[in-house]
Amino acid sequence: MAERKRLRAVLDATTRTPETNLIRAKLTHELRAVRVALIKVKTRVQITELKSARSHRTITLPVVATSALRAHRVRQLEARLAAGGRWQDAGFVFASRVGTPLDPRIVTRQYKALLMKAGLRDVRLHDLRHHAEPRIMPSPFIHPHS
């Protein structure tokens, strides 16, 4: 932030003349570069602990889900081989082409595009867990072995 303020002060102090146009253009370019760097820092994905002890649990998934996850794992291993030394193994089930966390904004944008293409109503991605959970998680009032 200090670098941005310094560049802005120098730019503001530089008078507009034909001789200073090149200097002003370079300062403006540097100022934009600092701004882009700041924006990228603010949108960094951070890994945090789960919210509660209940978040740490094992669930039983339907066969269709486990099959899809196994197929996804094969594709991910192929992507890992294709990425070579660029792969950063952080243990994510869903990761970028080089193993890094997915950018939530890009995931949301792609999800919205799929909804529109399929002609489905707009449901927030975060709300999908409420639609899927009753189908995957057994009712707390029904014993799983009954």
Image (cartoon, grey):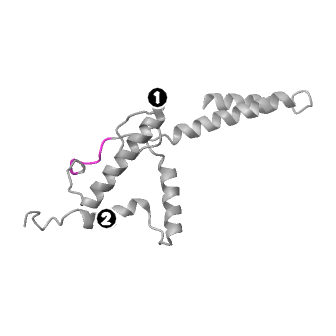
Name the residue rendered at 33%, 67% in the picture.
131
Name the residue rendered at 39%, 43% in the picture.
76
Residue matched to label 1 = 85
Residue matched to label 2 = 132
In screen coordinates, is 103 left or right of 131? right
Between discs 2 and 1, the one toward the N terminus: 1
Q: Residue 75 carries which label?
A: none
**Residue 137, position in %: x, y?**
22, 62
Residue 81 vertical placement versus 52 (above, below): above
**Residue 33, position in %: x, y?**
67, 34
Q: Quadrant of the N terminus?
A: top right
Residue type indicated by callout 2 = Ala
In screen coordinates, is 121 left or right of 37? left
What whole-number distance in Å separates the C-alpha atoms at marks 2 and 1?
37 Å
In screen coordinates, is 40 left or right of 30? left
Q: Does the magenta stretch mainly form a helix, a strand or a loop? A: loop
Q: Give the camera-side residue of 15 and 111.
A: 111
Q: Is residue 67 highlighted in magenta? A: no
Q: Give the camera-side residue of 84 and 3.
A: 84
- Residue 8 in view (yes/no): no
SS at circle 2: helix
Residue type indicated by callout 1 = Gly
In the image, which residues are magenta? 49-54
